[in-house]
Amino acid sequence: MTLTMLLYQKNTVYGERQPGPPSCTALPALRADTVLQFLLGFTFGNVVGMYLAQKYDIPNVAKKLKEMKKDLDAKKNPPSS
């Protein structure tokens, strides 16, 4: 049980529990669906990424960015004579 569910379900004078609001009972199911969807999407994305990296020649983006930065720096500074 979550803390909000416990706060809404306080004991009464007779020791009976009061039902919590409907949002508190639907919250764990919503969280489970969201977590499951995230895990499936994350796993599928990793599997597809590994397949593409092995099957095709994927360029190294970090190297490309460093080369582009070096080229831009060379164009900014004119050659001194």
Image: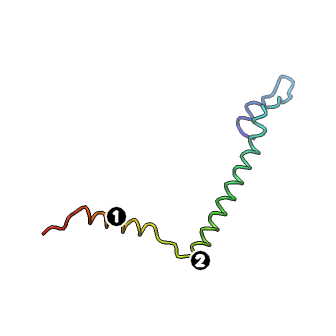
* Amino acid type at mark 1: Lys
Question: In the rendered view, how is the structure colored?
Answer: rainbow
Question: Whole-percent x and y of residue 22?
Answer: 79, 34
x and y, in percent, of residue 80 in the image: 15, 67
Name the residue nearer the viewer: 57 or 40.
Answer: 57
| Nearer-N-terminus badge (2/1) | 2
Tell me which residue sits at (25%, 61%) in the image: 76
Q: Secondary structure at mark 1?
A: helix
Q: Reply above or below: 19 against 73.
A: above
Say above or below: 57 vs 39: below
The quarter holding residue 74 reads bottom left
**The N terminus lies in quadrant:** top right
Q: Residues within 10 Å of mark 2 (few under 14, many from 20)?
A: few
**The C terminus is located in which quarter?**
bottom left
Q: Is residue 69 above or below residue 21?
A: below
Which numbered disc covers residue 55?
A: 2
Say which residue label 1 marks.
69
| Kind of residue at disc 2 | Lys
